[in-house]
Image: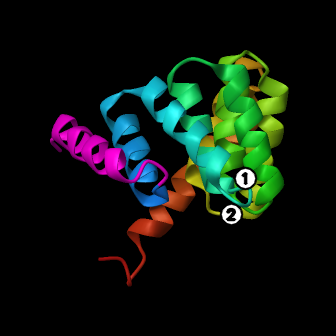
């Protein structure tokens, strides 16, 4: 967890090979972990400019960096691009929903959380987030139904004989 030393190491490696996809991706990830969101965004920008084909993961990760940096409209744009490249990625729908919720656009958030749930039926995070959005809209019965379902999912996980 010595992020600063890792960044120095990646900087050195990238001096010799500035377009190395692995080093750039790893440095961007470390920057996200250490809170260097603008640095991460710059690395993702560079990665996206040198990749031969669009990459859903890179757009998703850059969206996370934008969201963490408070650039919510940029985050929505990146999550939307990620979804267009991988329509089955529930986490991209969930995070776009979180971003909409931060903008106070709860109905759009609910739609994204619902899409995430449809893609991954046991997605506790999406159910929790949708419950919060319903609550913000004053739809308490729907919020409670989602909270209740999360409890059932968690109780089911506790009873799973294959769980370590």
Q: Which residue is drawn at 29% across and 51% down?
A: 13
Q: In which quarter of the image is residue 143?
A: top right
The magenta stretch is 1-19
Q: Residue at x 84, y 27 (%)?
A: 107
- The alpha-carbon separation of the residues under discs 2 and 1 comes to 6 Å
Above or below, 155 relative to 41: below
Q: In which quarter of the image is residue 123?
A: bottom right
Label 1: few (<14), some (14–19) or many (≥20) C-alpha neighbours in 10 Å: many
The foreground one among 113 and 157 is 113
Residue 36 seen by the camera: yes
Disc 1: which residue: 116
Q: Which residue is drawn at 36% across and 77% down?
A: 163
In which quadrant will I find the N terminus?
Answer: top left
Percent position of residue 120, x then y: 68, 63
Above or below, 98 relative to 149: above
Label 2: few (<14), some (14–19) or many (≥20) C-alpha neighbours in 10 Å: some
Percent position of residue 43, x then y: 50, 39
Disc 2: which residue: 120
In which quadrant will I find the C terminus?
Answer: bottom left
Viewed as shown, does residue 12 lie left or right of 82? left
Viewed as shown, does residue 114 lie left or right of 145? right
Residue 126 seen by the camera: no
């Amino acid at each position: 967890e010595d992020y600063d030393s890792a960044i120095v190491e990646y900087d050195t490696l990238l001096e010799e090979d500035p377009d190395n996809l692995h080093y750039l991706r790893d440095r961007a990830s470390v920057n996200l972990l250490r809170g260097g969101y603008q640095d991460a965004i710059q690395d993702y920008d560079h990665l996206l400019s040198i990749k031969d084909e669009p990459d859903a993961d890179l757009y998703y990760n850059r969206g996370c960096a934008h969201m963490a940096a408070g650039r919510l409209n940029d985050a929505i744009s990146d999550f939307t691009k990620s979804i267009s490249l991988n329509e089955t990625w529930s986490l991209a729908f969930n995070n776009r929903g979180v971003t909409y919720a931060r903008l106070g656009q709860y109905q759009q958030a609910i739609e994204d959380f619902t899409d995430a749930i449809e893609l991954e039926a046991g997605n506790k995070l999406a159910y929790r987030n949708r419950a919060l959005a319903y609550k913000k809209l004053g739809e308490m019965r729907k919020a409670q139904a989602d909270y209740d379902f999360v409890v059932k999912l968690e109780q089911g996980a506790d009873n799973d004989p294959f769980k370590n």
